[in-house]
Every structure is written in structure tokens, then in C-alpha cells.
Image: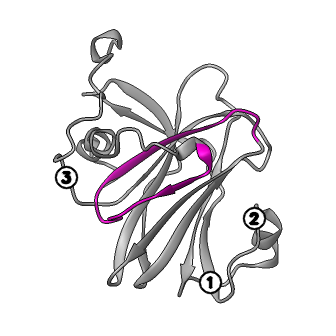
Amino acid sequence: MRSSSFWLLLLPLVGAHQPGANEGITEVEDATISYAIYGDFPTGSELREVHFTLPTPYALPFELLVPHIAGNEDFRPVYAVVGPGLPLPTADQVALLPKALPEGWGLFLDQNDNDPRDVVFEGFLRRVSWSTGTIAIPLREGEHQIWIWSPEQTPGEFVMGFGVEEDFSGGFGGVFEDWGTYAY
């Protein structure tokens, strides 16, 4: 998936802008569908959450993107996928978390600390982003959450991408409105 610009192309089309992302919690009805959850940290102290429930075990791919623009060089938000059946956190991971894990839950934590960071260019939508890289995480059935935050409390914008299946029944969410303004 990571090597495919097709995935990055379709990601924003399906999940375009999810209302509520900047209110803290975004509820996702079907996490198997490909989503791009756009969000920002106006002050850097915010926590954004995505909640979803899986009816059966499922391996979901996850990737956190930051626009590759001036001012974002040091912006490195992190994310954790939390839920039942995931590994229990280390003491260092617990210290980094923005809040306590629910009882019995574990996590996958991506600290966005690759150096250098991956740079991805999506040719159709003409966007360049820094990426944490894509990883597929096997999840059990049940409730799960994605937590996104800025440990350094740095403000900035991000896109949380996850899911697999494509669903264009809701249209394209205005993603093509400024398509012509970006150059290759």
C-alpha cells in the first residue's frame, strides 16, 4: 500500500473531510473503508481521537501524513492505535501517552521518529507530505481508537489515513475544488 500512489489518491476522496475531527473525536461507522481524517492542532496541546468498532478481526493499514510545507519541518505528531488484544505498553510508552489506556487495552504506538522522514508525492492530487510510513496492524473484533497528538505541543495540520476498501457512494467531498492550483 505504501508504495502505491493509488492508495494515497483514493484516501482523500473517500474520507475527504470528516466533520468533527477538530472537535476531538471522530466516529467512524465502517473502519474497513479507506479514510483520510484531516485535522489540526491550533495550539499543539490538543488530542484528536478516531473511534471505530470491528465486527470481526481485521488487519488495518495506518499512516499519519503531515503537509510538506515550510514551517512543518519539526512538526511530528504521533499516533497510537489502542484496543483489546494489542501489546501492553512499556513504561516509556505510558509516559508518552496523552491519557490513560482503558482497562485491558494495549496499543501500537508510532512515534513518528524516522530520520529522515519518508516523503510521499501523490501525483493526481498534487500533494507532497511527510509520512510515518504505512503499517498494517491486525486488530481483534470490538472497539478500537486512534489517538493523535503532538508530544512537543507543536501546532500544525495532519491527515490520519487508514482502512482498505474504497467507497465512492458519498461523492468526492470537494477534493477537486482546488485541483488546478497545484503544480507538479
Disc 1 residue crowd, few under 14, some 14–19, many 20+, Cα 10 Å: some
Callout 2: few (<14), some (14-19), or many (20+) C-alpha neighbours within 10 Å? some
- Decide which of tag 2 and tag 3 comes sooner along the chain: 2
The residue indicated by pointer 1 is 105
Label 2 element class: loop
Asked if marks 2 and 1 touch (Cβ < 8 Å), the reply is no
**Mark found first going from the N terminus, 1 or 3:** 1
Q: Quadrant of the N terminus?
A: bottom left
Q: Secondary structure at mark 3?
A: loop
Identify the residue shown where x is 40% and y is 38%. 17
What's the distance in space between the residues labelled 2 and 1, CA to CA? 13 Å
Horizontal side, residue 62 vs residue 165: left or right: right
Name the residue: 29% across, 27% down: 174
State whether residue 111 is above or below residue 108. above
- Quadrant for residue 96, please give it: bottom right
Which circle's residue, 2 or 1, is located before the other in the chain?
Answer: 2
62 shown above or below 64: below
Looking at the picture, tell me which residue is in the foreground, 114 or 156. 156
Residue occupied by mark 2: 97
Question: What kind of colouring is applied to the model shown?
Answer: one colour
Question: Would you call the spot at circle 3 few (<14 residues within 10 Å), some (14-19), or many (20 or more)?
Answer: some
Q: Which residue is mark 3?
A: 167
Q: Which residue is nearer to you in this view: 90 or 83?
A: 83
The magenta-colored residue range is 23-44
In percent of width and height, residue 71 lies at: 67, 22
* Residue 23 shown left or right of residue 32 in the figure: right
> What percent of the width, then of the height, locates residue 151?
77, 50
Name the secondary structure under disc 1.
strand
Q: Is residue 126 above or below residue 49?
A: above
Q: What's under tag 2, amino acid-wise?
A: Leu
- Amino acid type shown at disc 3: Asp
